[in-house]
Amino acid sequence: MRCRQKLARPGDTFPVFHCHSYPLPPGLEPGTAVKLVSFDRGFWTVEAKGKRFENVFVSSVKAGWLYELKGRWLDEKDPEVIAVKKAVRAPSPERAAAGTHP
């Protein structure tokens, strides 16, 4: 199952978090839901709590993931995607009995 990051567009709302090399602007706390306003050369201008913040690095915006399943791209929260991911992580009966599943 392939996955790709969702495309973020102006007007979308997503949470933001610190990116290791690019801290969030002063006053913008990790986990805050922001509205994306504009994008320029790797950085978003966002709005949160009635304030505008500039220079939010693209990797700080957590748009989420899409997964390809049976030729369709589905949201990471789709029940079909969750079921497949759970099945992939489940140990086989042989490995569970042998105690070799991580």
Image (tube, grey):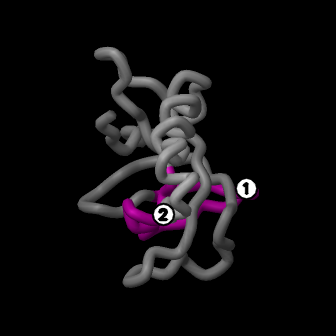
Q: In the rendering, at what x and y percent does residue 40 appear?
A: 29, 56
Residue drawn at x 48%, y 63% is 100
Residue drawn at x 24%, y 60% is 41
Q: Is residue 58 magenta?
A: yes
Q: In the rendering, at what x and y percent does residue 61 appear?
A: 48, 57
Q: How many numbered callouts?
A: 2
Q: Label 2 vs label 1: CA separation? A: 53 Å
Lateral position of residue 36 relative to residue 26, left or right: left
Answer few, some or many: residues within 10 Å of disc 1's Cα (few below 14, many 20 plus, some between 14 and 19): few
Dot 2 or dot 1: first in sequence order is: 1
Asked if residue 37 can be seen in this view, the reply is: yes
Q: Main secondary structure of the magenta part?
A: strand
> Residue 4, which numbered label?
none
Furthest toward the left, the residue is 41
Location of residue 12 with respect to 48 vertically, above or below: above
Nearer to the camera, 33 or 41: 33
Lateral position of residue 99 relative to residue 49, left or right: left
Q: Amino acid at mark 1?
A: Gly
Q: Magenta region: which residues? A: 45-62
Q: In the rendering, at what x and y percent does residue 83 appear?
A: 57, 29
Q: Amino acid at mark 2?
A: Thr
> SS class of the residue under badge 2?
loop
Residue at numbered disc 1: 50
Answer few, some or many: residues within 10 Å of disc 2's Cα (few below 14, many 20 plus, some between 14 and 19): few
Of badges 2 and 1, the one in the foreground is 2
Residue drawn at x 33%, y 41% is 4
Asked if residue 11 can be seen in this view, the reply is: no
Furthest toward the right, the residue is 49
Residue at numbered disc 2: 100
Location of residue 21 with respect to 98 vertically, above or below: below
